[in-house]
Image (cartoon, rainbow, N blue to C red):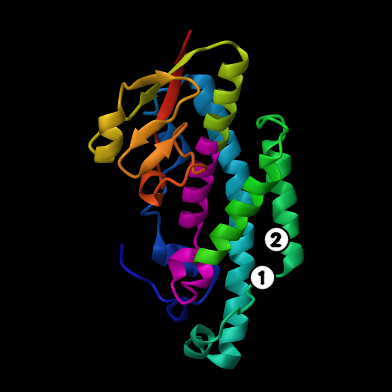
Amino acid sequence: MARVLLSEVRSYKDLNDKVGYTVSEPYDEYYRPMKISKVQKSRRADLAKRLDTIFEGLLITAYESQRQYSIISGLDEINRLSGTMVYRIEDIEEARQEYLDAVDGIYDPDRRLPGRADETIYGMLAVLMRHLDDAYYYSRDRARAIAEEESNFVYEYSELAEALRAGYTRKRWNTIMDGRERDSHAELNGTVMPIDQPFMARGGLLQFPGDDSMGVSDEELVNCRCSLSYQK
């Protein structure tokens, strides 16, 4: 992916035309090969679309703020400043509530839900703060990639909780073996574990694909398209 500098774009449309879509995929293409039912694919795509809108809204706000600020200060000065605010706290709070509304009824109503919203939104913006002059980090491509990944997390988490309630005792890791899979996830493909025990990947332990609660390496998480199925 060729790097596009923020100073090289004239508008948000121009930014996305130059960045293109090199990381994310259209929703139907992203979810089609996953080893889940058509209903599960449809639900994940629907949630990803809602989250995409939320995340892109924040990135547009950040882009507009940075463009306005850079006219005055220049990108070199921006990058020397620490804690540059490229968004308003009220924008973050609004996005956080929209996230909670989007996943309402999917997640278990437990304490992890608000924390996950904060982790995702603040994490997305924290990474942006380290790449203020790189157009990709404001792009629709990035928003969609994060939304697709986040939708997978939400449903894998929720489906595991539902399987536990339904009395399932074992879980099976399913990897899409299409040449794009991680070697570590290829090794996990077909592995069956007791439902309450984690899988051991090269980068650490995961209760389900996308699970970051046990300190697993980010290399095991980003853009993971794996899924679980359950056995009694």
Q: Is residue 13 visible?
A: no
What is the quadrant of residue 231 in the picture?
top left
Quadrant for the N terminus in the image:
bottom left
**Front-most of residues 122 and 197:** 197
Occupied quadrant, residue 59: bottom right
Residue 230 image offset from top left, x and y in percent: 46, 15
Asked where in the image residue 84 lies, by quadrant, the reply is bottom right
Residue for point 37% across, 42% down: 204
Magenta residues span 128-153
Report helix, strand or loop for mark 1: loop
Q: Residue at x 52, y 24 (%)?
A: 40
Crowding at label 1, few (<14), some or many (≥20) Cα neighbours within 10 Å? some
Give the residue drawn at x 53%, y 71%. Answer: 129
Q: Is residue 219 visible?
A: yes
Which residue is labeled 1 in the image?
Answer: 87
Q: Secondary structure at mark 2?
A: helix
Q: Residue at x 33, y 37 (%)?
A: 201
Residue 109 in the image: state x and y as whole percent. Answer: 73, 32
Point out residue 27 in the picture as x, y percentages from the top left corner: 47, 38
Q: CA distance from mark 1 to mark 2?
A: 8 Å
Q: Which residue bears the numbered disc 2?
A: 92
Sequence-wise, the earlier of marks 1 and 2 is 1
Q: Are marks 1 and 2 in contact (CB under 8 Å)?
A: yes
Quick one: label 2, few (<14), some, or many (20+) residues within 10 Å?
some
